[in-house]
Image (tube, rainbow, N blue to C red):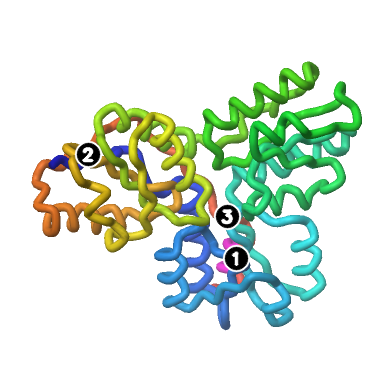
Amino acid sequence: MKLLIAGLRGFCAGVVRAISVVEQALEICEGTVYVRKEIIHNRYVVDELRDRGAVFVDELDEVPDGQVVIFSAHGISPAVRDTARRKRLRTIDATCPLVTKVHLEVVHFAKQGYTILFVGHKDHDETIGTLGEAPGAIRVVGSREEAERVEVADPHKVVYLTQTTLSVDDTREIVDVLHQRFPALKAPPKEDICYATQNRQDAVKALASHVDVLLVLGAPNSSNSLRLCEVARARNIRAHLIETAADIRLEWLENAKVVGLTASASAPEILVQQVIDYARTELGITDIEELDTVKEDVHFSLPHELAAMARATSS
């Protein structure tokens, strides 16, 4: 049996930024550092930050007035910001800049009187935050069937935007339906699906022609993790989402000559190495190889609020 690993895998720039925000806040801020929602959708990362002192909450009413709170990488609605101001919270916004870009697009098109068809999953944190920017103007479209049913006030003033972590192929199918129904449909000024999501899906497509089964390290509430499984299954490759090596079931690997492994944009490299160790020690695999595709060299600067807090602490 052989283990073939996607050379492009794991943390994207937005995730690296979000984790760095929490780590640095824990170092420079006095008192408790609160984080609204999971900073990213990965239990290992959240548990590690919790062990270091971060307190994760679902809503801001759990945060005492005047304390430090970090907003997760998935973005928040204006209503959450209003609550933070009312409670005089010291906020640090770890929203991925690519998600912020979509929020700004929503505000722009809503002011222009457009109906916004937002292609995304309605229960995902990113969609919930985006929807809050202009709830009266947005229609969430999560499937081809919903695209065939959605109604708009003026078919000549309609635009589509998307969640950043979707399947590129599924999104294209939904958008094709919307274009057929609304010929005047505008596209986002620049692609909304993030570079990292697309690159990791492309890496899975490259793996698919070489493997019999694919293991995807990620979380069940992580959209980009689930999409990687879907991309593989669309190519008739058995795919299984795992959070750690302990989740691997031997029956998945029966009759497999080549096992593929990748990690979603929110899965840390340490979990990849644990699976590699498991493959060596428990499965006796010695033939381990990486399949390289594209390289990434994207970095995002840290939020200005964090730098301001650091200066205040050192002064």
Residue 307 belongs to magenta span: yes
**Left or right, 225 with reference to 119:** left
Residue 192: in sight, yes or no? Answer: yes
Q: Which mark is residue 73?
A: 3
Instruction: Answer whether labels 1 and 3 touch (C-beta < 8 Å).
Output: no
Element under label 1? Answer: loop
Q: Amino acid at mark 2?
A: Leu
In this view, the residue in front, 246 or 251, is 251
Decide: is 216 above or below 59: above
Dot in front, 3 or 2: 2
Q: Residue at x 66, y 46 (%)?
A: 100
Earlier residue among tags 1 and 3: 1
Residue 91 belongs to magenta span: no
Q: Which residue is mark 1?
A: 37
Q: Position of residue 216 (x, y in %)?
A: 36, 47
Element under label 3? Answer: loop
Classify 10 Å Cα crowding around label 3: few (below 14), some (14-19), many (20 and above).
many
In this view, the residue in front, 42 or 148, is 148
Q: Residue at x 73, y 76 (%)?
A: 61
Q: Within the image, what quadrant is residue 306 found in?
A: bottom right
Q: Which residue is mark 2?
A: 4
Q: Residue at x 75, y 48 (%)?
A: 131
How far apart, in angstroms, are the residues tagged by discs 2 and 1? 34 Å
Read off the magenta span.
Answer: 306-310
